[in-house]
């Protein structure tokens, strides 16, 4: 399906130069002189190579239609992640690079959404939030304003994040899988 380049969004799959690409980031740039253009960071689905491409906003690109399928995280096997279809119990093996920055947030029996193009996996979506334990948290510094001050903390999966001063080591918190940012204290 053809679409204008300015409608490209992260997570879409496009065909360019005879290859399939997964869009990682996009940014529309409007220079002071001349027409606007879109800068797209994308990954080749077969080789895994990343590249940046620029199009004028009026250019057209071929967008591939994806279907969503739910899977459950089963286990880690070396450099691969094994997922299971909860309906047919078939297993799908994906390389760890497929998950990018979200890999540390995988948890046992987590429900995942896999995007498929003609039966081939092209993208994975984790739940938006996960609950993790704080392993280390810096002590509170007296005199800091409580309204906008955050302190660094280490989560149980090894990822660092910023948390409010009242969060201590050993507490469970909810964090976003997208950028590891603090959402709230776990209930």
Image (cartoon, rainbow, N blue to C red):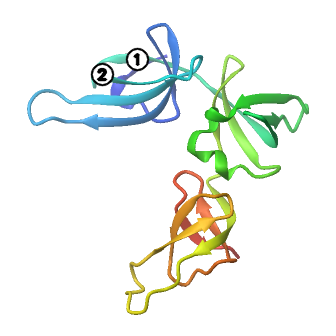
Query: Relative to 147, does residue 84 appear above or below in the rendering?
Result: above
Within 10 Å of disc 2 (Cα), the crowding (few <14, some 14-19, many 20+) is some
Residue 168's image quarter? bottom right
- x and y percentages locating residue 55 in the rendered image: 30, 21
Q: Is 171 on the left-hand or right-hand side of 175? A: right
Name the residue: 77% across, 49% down.
110
Q: Residue furthest right?
A: 89
- Closer to viewer: mark 2 or mark 1: 2
Within 10 Å of disc 1 (Cα), the crowding (few <14, some 14-19, many 20+) is some
Mark before the other along the chain sequence, 2 or 1: 2
Query: Relative to 36, does residue 157 appear above or below in the rendering?
Result: below
Name the residue: 51% across, 54% down.
179
Count numbered badges in the picture: 2
* Residue that carries the numbered disc 1 in the rendered image: 61
* Residue that carries the numbered disc 2 in the rendered image: 55
Q: Is 72 on the left-hand or right-hand side of 56? A: right
Circle 1 SS class? strand
- x and y percentages locating residue 72 in the rendered image: 80, 42
Circle 2 SS class? strand
Name the residue: 56% across, 23% down.
48
Query: Relative to 57, does residue 187 appear above or below in the rendering?
Result: below
Name the residue: 67% across, 59% down.
130
**Pointer 2 and pointer 1: residues touching (CB < 8 Å)?**
yes
Q: Quadrant of the C terminus?
A: bottom right
Say which of 54 and 57 sits in front. 54
* Distance Cα–Cα, label 2 vs label 1: 9 Å
């Amino acid at each position: 399906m053809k679409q204008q380049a300015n409608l490209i969004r992260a997570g879409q799959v496009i065909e360019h130069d005879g290859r399939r690409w997964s869009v990682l980031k996009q940014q529309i740039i409007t220079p002071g002189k001349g027409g606007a253009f879109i800068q797209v960071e994308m990954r080749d689905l077969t080789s895994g190579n990343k590249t940046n491409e620029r199009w004028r906003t009026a250019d057209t690109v071929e967008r591939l239609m994806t279907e969503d399928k739910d899977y459950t995280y089963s286990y880690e096997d070396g450099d691969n992640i094994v997922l299971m279809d909860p309906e047919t119990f078939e297993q799908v093996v994906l390389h760890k690079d497929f998950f990018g920055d979200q890999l540390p947030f995988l948890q046992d029996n987590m429900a995942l959404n896999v995007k498929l193009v003609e039966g081939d996996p092209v993208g994975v979506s984790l739940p938006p939030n996960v609950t993790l334990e704080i392993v280390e948290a810096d002590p509170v510094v007296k005199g800091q304003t409580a309204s906008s001050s955050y302190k660094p903390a280490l989560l149980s999966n090894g990822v660092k994040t910023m948390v409010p001063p009242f969060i201590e080591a050993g507490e469970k918190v909810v964090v976003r899988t997208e950028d590891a940012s603090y959402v709230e204290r776990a209930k």
